[in-house]
Image (cartoon, helix red, strand yellow):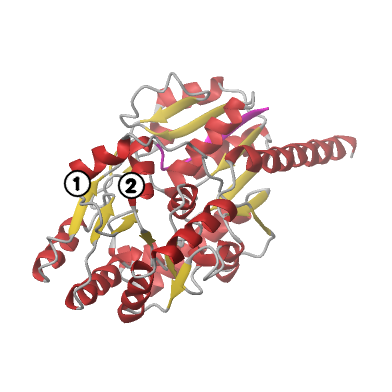
Amino acid sequence: MRIGQYSDSFLPVVDGVGRVVFSYAKSLGNMGHQCTVFAPMANMGYLGDYPFQVIDYNSFQMPGKMPYRVGLPQLDARFHKKTQMTKMDIVHVHSPFMLGHSGLQVAKKRRLPVVATFHSKFYDDFKMTLKSETLARAATRQVVEFFEQCDEVWAVSESSGQTLTEYGFRGEVIAMPNGTEIRALDEAVLPELRERFSLREGVPILLYVGQLNWKKNILHILEAVRLLREKGCAFRLLLAGQGPHRDEIEQKINEWALSDQVTFPGHIDNTRDLDGLYALADLFVFPSLYDNAPMVLREAAAMGTPALLIEGSNAAECIVSGVNALTCRDEPVALADTIAKGLTDPALLDRLGQAARETIPVPWTRLMDQVIHRYQALIGRKAEAASRRCAE
């Protein structure tokens, strides 16, 4: 099968969407399918070891949206030429923006089936950027209209599919969860990371991995650790990632005199180091109300690290509180109390971590069987419809 994966986010950006697209392309390629990723041009490093090809278009960094890039693929003659030369049986778009529209256009022109995956809470992003509910609703309607042009729509969880329906989408939304790359931990990395980030043995480690963006509820993490420090709790908080509010977050940490207990490991693009950070952490603290099906939760679970999530959040859909993770109310006091409960009961965290490892991660290879089945069924339905039209 020849599959085109279209995404406005890809390497070296390692946000959730970009990593999902990378995992789709890698897994499908390893299974013998011809996968081509269409993405913005960036310094992706050497990709010769991967079983897929990348066709990129000229782009530039989005102002205030580091590290994301944007451009007009339809104006890039080289991109257009290479796209024309690429044979595809199906198009899978992961964004309703530039590359999504490019993929939809190619699919319509060639009469190919097109699948679209709904990943993000776009209304929240629009409202934050545009500072207007009216404009945010108008932009969201454009997103809905995009998905309504696709042959099949997937969402990364049941709750995220419900979000798209609440936006006004009238069709069926199929839940297609994200997988996890199951890797063996390199134990040798643990002392290296302890030395690099000055992590002392015996001091509990709290870990957050993701965008350094206030929309991820990071302020509540800082408020919670401030309360824990006032109670005399010993801990280190690692905020791993990059994002537009990195400086503001550090300013708040300095204002509250938390700098001795909070460390910024930065952007971790090395899976060996990232797995090591997960493994070192006693608790993965992820109170985001924005995320739908965070891959970081699954990666932490694969390393046996339990998570603390907000009860009722989309991110908590795949867990059972008290069985393979912890949850609490969306309040700094509740977050602090639940962290303290975990840190004072290592046996509880060990039990939750083991259960998380056994129940949360789903290997990408297992998920791809379901993906391929749906691709093939959609290709078949498209071919049947074309035959009927010819017969008429």
Is residue 188 left or right of 27 when viewed as pictured? left
What's the residue at 49%, 47% (across, down)?
A: 302
Element type at mark 2: helix
| Residue drawn at x 19%, y 62% as measured from the top left | 249
Cα gap from disc 2 to disc 1, whole angstroms: 10 Å
| Magenta-drawn segment | 1-10
Identify the residue under disc 1: 197
Res 91 → quadrant: top right
Residue tagged by mark 2? 277
In the figure, 351 relative to 89: above or below?
A: below
Residue at left offset 58%, top offset 66%: 159
Amino acid under label 1?
Answer: Phe
Task: Please state which of residues 187 and 48 is positioned toward the viewer in this rendering.
Answer: 187
Amino acid at circle 2: Leu
Identify the disc placed on residue 187: none
The answer to whether residue 139 is seen in the rendering is no
